[in-house]
Amino acid sequence: MNQLELTLTRLVLGLVAFVAQRFALKNEVLFASSRDHVLGPQLAALSTAIREAGPERAQRVALAPYGYGITSKVRYLLHLIGATWALHRTKITIIDNAWLPVHITARRSGSRVFQVWHAEGAYKRFGHAARGTSTLADGALHALIHRGYDAALVSSEEVRLAYAEAFQMPVERVYAVGPLHGAWLANEARVAARANALREQYPALEGRRVLLYAPTFRGRGVSRRSALAISPDAIAAALPPDWIVLIKAHPLVPITDTATHPSCLIVDRRTPVEDLFPVADALFTDYSSSVFLWSLMARPLLLAIDDVAEYSQDPGLFADLSASDGIGQRVSSAADVAALLTGGKTHGDAAARERYHAFAERYLGPRAELDGAPARAAALILSEELPAQRRSERQ
């Protein structure tokens, strides 16, 4: 969004907000996102938990991804007009990403905005923690991003400071509630049932060992892409025929790359990656936050992070998985992947599993408390007053 587009958007949405605030607030919850046309996993889990905690409270949604090109931008502005009206008529708004109506319009007294983010843990830097990098270059719009939150809800005490930095908000207003979704991955029976369902859904997986290929994205805007030097085709060619490579592109990456090897299977990029975990014998990724939920299963993790020195500078990292308390094994080629997966060296011992469990507890919270995270979050959101808390155990 250039300066002219931002100025026009602020004027239009500011007028909408001014008019909307002349009307009474509704005792409703608005779920909003600029990521997709459907509720993401965190928002969906909270919607269910809030419905169970307060069934009398109506829920609304304002969902649409940002578009590129003149037509898409006009369509998105029209969406924002309705979304801004809803924001300023609703007592509680919950978002999972940067969302313009919150950042560029004046707050309304009596309303509250909660940021729950769309990922667990904190791996790569984002928001204001990545200012000055290619992720968040300086500019008028980026100076406004992440303004206007009453509270942020995160997965553990460990990451409170990271989110406070990313959102430029006091750490006292960042609440550790646990993972809002994915806790079921710690339940072996549920994982097994989901694996069986996936093999029925994708018959090509039956009788095969599965490597889930799920890197994060590089770049911004229309230039977003996966940029791994190790292709799924190369990995499939290096693995024995009893293996299959299940390819899950990041939801923000346009599908331009194709895999042609017969032992590669591409799934819908809009599928939540954690929904595919149960059927995977190993995960191949780079700097994806999916590693946090993956750690609940303590299965092999292969990391293509040869550029970690550069990536640590731009956009930067909160977590260092190469440290002694990290998880996963580093790979530099398809041959490395094949050697680890077929050579019996993929950390199946008790010590490695213990390291995974410790990692999961650090970034997701105590295992026994995982299932209660959505209910805890709902109670906090619906409370009349946000509870006081100390600054952070990690300071």
Image (spheres, rainbow, N blue to C red):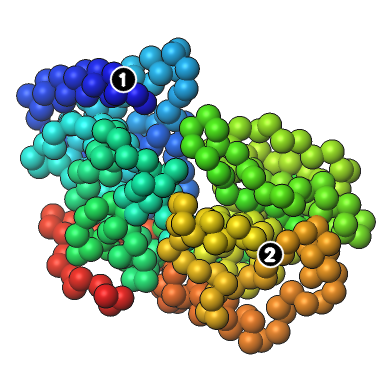
Instruction: Where is residue 216? Give x, y as percent.
Output: 57, 49
Instruction: Where is residue 87? Give x, y as percent.
Output: 23, 33
Work out how far the residue at label 1 is from the one at label 2, CA to CA, in angstroms: 42 Å
Q: Quadrant of residue 330?
A: bottom right
Crowding near the residue tagged with mark 2, few <14, some 14–19, many ≥20 C-alpha atoms within 10 Å:
many
Instruction: Identify the residue position indicated by label 2 in the image.
Output: 302
| Lateral position of residue 249 relative to residue 4, left or right | right
Q: Which mark is residue 371?
A: none
One can see residue 270 in this view: no
In which quadrant will I find the C terminus?
Answer: bottom left
Q: Residue at x 65, y 51 (%)?
A: 214
Q: Identify the amino acid type marked 2.
A: Leu
Q: Between 26 and 339, which is closer to the camera in this rendering?
A: 339
One can see residue 313 in this view: yes
Instruction: Where is residue 321? Give x, y as percent.
Output: 55, 69
Q: Secondary structure at mark 1?
A: helix
Q: Residue at x 47, y 17 (%)?
A: 69
Q: Quadrant of residue 258?
A: top right
Q: Nearer the viewer, mark 1 or mark 2?
A: 1
Instruction: Where is residue 62? Give x, y as percent.
Output: 35, 31
For the view shown, which residue lies furthest in the bottom direction?
351
Q: Residue at x 60, y 39 (%)?
A: 225
Q: Which mark is residue 5?
A: 1
Q: Secondary structure at mark 2?
A: strand
Q: Between 224 and 274, which is closer to the camera in this rendering?
A: 224
* Numbered label tally: 2
| Lateral position of residue 52 relative to residue 200, left or right | left
Q: Between 352 and 52, which is closer to the camera in this rendering?
A: 352
Q: Identify the amino acid type marked 1.
A: Glu
